[in-house]
Amino acid sequence: MPEGDTLFRTAQGLRPYLVGRDILAARAQGPGPVPQVQRIVGKRVDAVEAQGKNLLIRFDGGLEIRTHLRMNGSWHRYRPGERWRRPPGRARLVLEVDGTVAVCFDAPVVELFETRTEPLHPSLSRLGPDLLKPEFDAAEAHRRLRAPERAEMSISAALLDQRALAGIGNIWRNETLFAERVDPWAPVRDLDDATLDRLIATARRLLTQSAGVAPGRTSTKVYRRAGRPCPRCGTVIRSAPLSGEVPRTTYWCPSCQGGS
């Protein structure tokens, strides 16, 4: 599943080609609900932004499109007439402006709504502080992680909960826990405040560096490295499934981080 840094770069890549241009043609297709995107034809694109793992395209006149890519979705940009890299049947949304065709493939969520309703949106309104936003509120993220409903959650599951802090996914969740030597299976209630603050700060640092917002380079140390030696201590890295609505895999060093 693309993480917040991927969506941030996607928005950056689309923005110069869409913002300020009028929609010449738009079409959408299923599976799932198909929005009436003909309503945006003739509208000017005012903004292309990432919000957590969502991509938002706002138009003059108060309309907005939200896509969520989940596991397999992606946005592509083509010149008019250029051959697409994926079959047209997998295109969920196609937007045409002067000089550019933007195509969203395989996204399970494509919806059109009025921007004024965004504060009431069932998904967007519940998002926690966005790790990639300049105004990121670390104190609010801490408060949300400490909420009673997350006390018994493993810290692995809590970091993935977009209602606590938005943007982090499986890669940087694993790397954050490894960097801070935290047992991924530890319940949130067992972690002290200083540890939570370190995890929040490290998650933000890794995402902003990966997105190119902050200086520095990122590389994975444990993600998808099960069976290989830990780069710190040489212990074999382990992996195990993390249960949830979308199955994820946890990778960790049992020596550096603990955990069974």
Image (cartoon, rainbow, N blue to C red):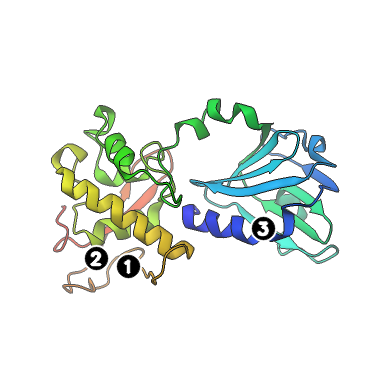
Q: What residue lies at 26% left-to-right and 56% top-to-bottom?
A: 177
Q: What residue lies at 53% left-to-right and 55% top-to-bottom?
A: 8
Amino acid type, mark 1: Arg
Amino acid type, mark 3: Leu
- Secondary structure, mark 3, is helix
Q: Which residue is mark 1?
A: 225
In the picture, measured across the screen, residue 66 lies left or right of residue 146, that is right
Q: Nearer the observer, disc 3 or disc 1?
A: 3
| Quadrant housing residue 10 | bottom right
Q: What residue lies at 52% left-to-right and 34% top-to-bottom?
A: 124
- Secondary structure, mark 1, is loop
| Quadrant housing residue 83 | bottom right
State which tag comes first along the sequence, 3 or 1: 3
Q: Is residue 180 above or below residue 154?
A: below
Image coordinates of residue 69 in percent, x first then y, are: 57, 48
- Secondary structure, mark 2, is loop
CA separation, marks 3 and 1?
A: 33 Å
Q: Nearer the observer, disc 3 or disc 2?
A: 3
Q: What residue lies at 24% left-to-right and 35% top-to-bottom?
A: 146
Q: Residues within 10 Å of mark 1 (few under 14, many from 20)?
A: some
| Quadrant housing residue 29 | top right
Residue 3 appears anywhere in the view: no
Badge 3 vs badge 2, beta-carbon distance below 8 Å: no
CA separation, marks 1 and 2?
A: 7 Å
Q: Is residue 143 above or below residue 248?
A: above
Residue 120 appears anywhere in the view: yes
Front residue of 187/209: it is: 209
**Image disc number at residue 237:** 2
Badge 1 vs badge 2, beta-carbon distance below 8 Å: yes
State which tag comes first along the sequence, 1 or 2: 1
Front residue of 252/197: it is: 197
Q: Which residue is mark 3?
A: 14
